[in-house]
Image (cartoon, rainbow, N blue to C red):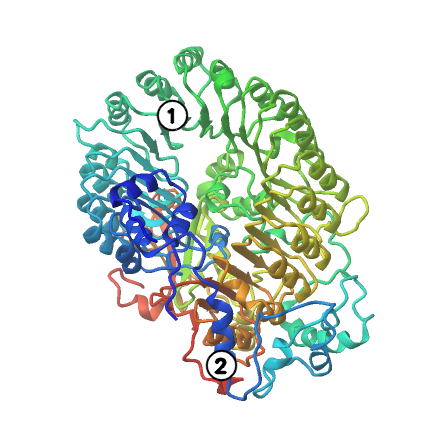
Amino acid sequence: MAYSFPEEVLEHVFSFLSSDKDRNAVSLVCKSWYEIERWCRRRIFVGNCYAVAPEIVIRRFPEVRELEMKGKPHFADFNLVPEGWGAYLDPWISAMSVAYPFLEEIKLKRMVVTDDSLELISKSFKNFKVLVLSSCEGFTTDGLASIAANCRNLRELDLRESEVFDLNGHWLSHFPDNYTSLVSLNMSCLHSEVNLSTLERLVARSPNLKTLRLNRAVPLEKLPNLLRRAPQLVDLGTGVYSAEIRSDTFSNLTEAFSTCKQLEGLSGLWDVVQAYLPALYSVCSGITSLNLSYATIQSSDLVKLVGQCRNLQRLWVQDYIEDSGLEAVAESCKDLQELRVFPSDPFGEEPNVSLTERGLVSVSEGCPKLQSVLYFCRQMSNTALIAIARNRPKMIRFRLCIIEPRARDYITLEPLDTGFGAIVEKCKDLRRLSLSGLLTDRVFDYIGTHAKKLEMLSIAFAGDSDLGLHHVLSGCESLRKLEIRDCPFGDKALLANAAKLETMRSLWMSSCSVSYGACKLLGQKMPMLNVEVIDESGHPDSRPDSWPVEKLYIYRTVAGRRLDMPDYIWKMDEDKELEYS
Amino acid sequence: MQREVIPGGGVIGGGSMSALSEESSSYPDGSELELGLGLSLGCSGGGGGKGKSKTPSVAAAGGSWDQFARILTADDFPSVISDKDSSSSSSSSSSTIKAKNNGFCGSKRTAEPSSPPGRSGVSQVVGWPPIKAHRMNSLVNHSKIPAVEEFTSTVDKCKNENTNIAVEKRLSRTSFFIKVNMERIPIGRKVDLNAHSCYETLARKLDDMFRPGAAVGPRRSILEEQAAMADMRCPVRLLDESSEFVLIYEDKEGDWMLVGDVPWQMFLSTVRRLKIMKTSEANGLAFAVE
């Protein structure tokens, strides 16, 4: 029995579905639902730009308005991925400039974007509104000038942490005088000075401006002028937060901040001069997100500031805050959800500040909503990890970096297996985990047994044998991304769990023990995977098959082998003859 | 088999299993390759026997894959507790793998003594600790101790021109990393220009970085092994006119210039990135290489 709903009704129903998972499920119901859904899908998320080709996306989803895409593997952030690896935006823009004239949003992470692409974006999409380039590279401020000049309806321009070839600050003046639609501008990654009066005029004529993140070059003395023109700001990133200590600068600043009644987010704060911190006090009670990770100030000054932010939900800070500061945070910031503590001196021989595992334990005790942690420290114990796990069973993201690789429990000198084991056992909703310290295969047994919701796992200098990797691949049902460096994992676990790799987005392994022969086998037997061997010392065929590969990146794809690899990446595909084995 | 992966979503259909068994039956020597199927550890009695006795050599002549692909049992893996040699049947297979890989992997076992407190080469391990580049560039105290040493020595060396500047820099120093690429080496490096106050020390630093045999990490890579075997031990001597290599930089206007012509401070304000080229190749370029 079949009855038909008019398509428009179904479309209307589907329009309430925003998550990809829901839409994917809907499209599996039957052919007509598949058809209707694909015509009305507006937002596409491509987690790995090489998992699919532009033509495939365009063919299935003809009416896309928003594209979000990620390129390079995460370890590219730490210089583990060589230059020229790939993740080029150009082919996508070329295809979409024709297919999606009504595209409004492009959000990218770790991709290579050229000025040509930016110009093409600015000229092809008449209604273009949002450009977010997170950790991207390959473009210059000339590309930004095209965007500024041609995108008449631009609302968001966010360059967070991108590497921009910064020629000069002139691009800002390319925004036309009658342009007023700006809602969010993040130029914090740029180095050049911009013309401040141009910036002030831009801010003055943008009544909808909610987010403004300046770059370091904007002097503190000029900040009040900008704030006065945008008292409606919700998110502010200051420029350098230091200046000659003068009372008029101070009072100017204090007064300007006091007019910003809606401020919730505060960042920038490079090179903080303690004397100017009190200027911020008037906004503290409304602040929910505070990024002090570039502020080099003492713990007591940090505490004075943070202690007033009773509604704080997110705190990023350097380890200058020390254990005592974190205890104070645990006392005052009962709404804290996310804590990130960065090392001020990661390469120093001796710790320069008194920040240990105790700080994190305090926060886990005092902050009932804590769910996301990134913590760099120099010592850790199983006891501390167990306490953290018991205190915060709702933890979702737990990334711990003990700076010394393979560091033991500093009290018992044992591996940290039981500590991390407690984390995965108690925190049943854990989605992301980064391990560090001395770890044996046992920790992976715990992870495979308990971490059923884990989606992303980062492993470095850990494990004893293939059993460790096998536990993870066979046990972690929700695993999507796995990145491993400097671990003794080899062929066995990988080959025994080959099918698992098709259920994941990607696997990165570098400085491990996977042999070239195993890579070839995997490439031959798994056509839905791209197995890419990164090896700069010449063609791996010139070495025995048992030779371990330097770096290995495996990802599932429907686009087949990619054609834009540099000459130090070798593709393992069906063409490889078995004569090698 | 045509399957579509919905972007961001899962894979449609359960085709992977059947696809695998189809392919495994086409494996040339006829043995069944059961990658990823039916793996069970410890409890299933069968299947483990074959895997135990033979050496799981990857490179052996064809037909050796069945050892890996067979149902593996816990016996195939070394025992988890640190005493590696305790289980007899596994030690042969695991130690064979270890013997093969030890030369390259340098993986640390739990038997190793704990690393001493304080740094033991953390700064020499690429990408560790995992801190993003833009954050590294803002670290005021980056490489505090090496930098101080470098500063006192560089200040000595550069006494003529740059002493005052070097002292100033030390007091309020931030990092200024730029990329350096050497021709024909795909992996570029980054160097902190603010750690130097004159060209000589920079050249020496680059010399160290790009000379084969420079430590990249605790594990010597294949590149280093091979290069060490090859005949490439001599220093690069970048500023030396008679050197085989020349150091050039790209400035803010996008032009490539020879390093060393302008005063150091001016160089710092215009340099975008560095490149090391063979003198013979550079000769064909616009600037004169004397």
Q: Is residue B98 above or below residue A1?
A: below
Q: Report how far apart the C-alphas of labels 1 and 2 lie in the structure.
A: 57 Å
Does any portion of residue A277 appear in the rendered image? yes
Q: Residue at x 45, y 11 (%)?
A: A247
Amino acid on which the number 1 mark rests in the picture:
Pro
Task: State the image coordinates of residue A501 (x, y, percent, origin top left).
Answer: 52, 63
Relative side of B172 to B4, left or right? right
Residue identifier under label 2: A542
x, y (%) of residue A337?
57, 31
Relative placement, left or right, of B198 versus A476 is left
Residue at image coords 64%, 57%: A461
Q: Tag 1, which secondary structure?
A: loop
Q: Residue A571's mark?
A: none
**Is the residue at mark 1 from the same chain as the one at mark 2?**
yes
Residue pointed to by mark 1: A219
Question: In this rendering, which labeled residue sits more in front, label 1 or label 2?
Answer: 2
Secondary structure at numbered mark 2 = helix
Bin the neighbour count of mark 2 within 10 Å (Cα to Cα): few under 14, some 14-19, many 20 and up. few
Chain on which label 1 sits: A
Quick one: quadrant of the C terminus of chain A? bottom right
Q: Relative to B234, say whether A120 is above or below.
A: above
Mark 1: few/some/many CA within 10 Å (<14, 14-19, 20+): some
A466 lies above or below A243: below
Residue A167 seen in render: no
Residue A382, horizontal then vertical, whole percent: 75, 44
Q: Quadrant of residue A192?
A: top left
Question: Exactly how many numbered labels are in the figure?
Answer: 2
Residue B259 is situated, as x and y percent measured from the top left of the image, at 36, 54
Q: List the single residue furthest toward the front.
A: A1
| Front residue of A232 and A255 | A232
Q: Is residue A312 left or right of residue B237?
A: right
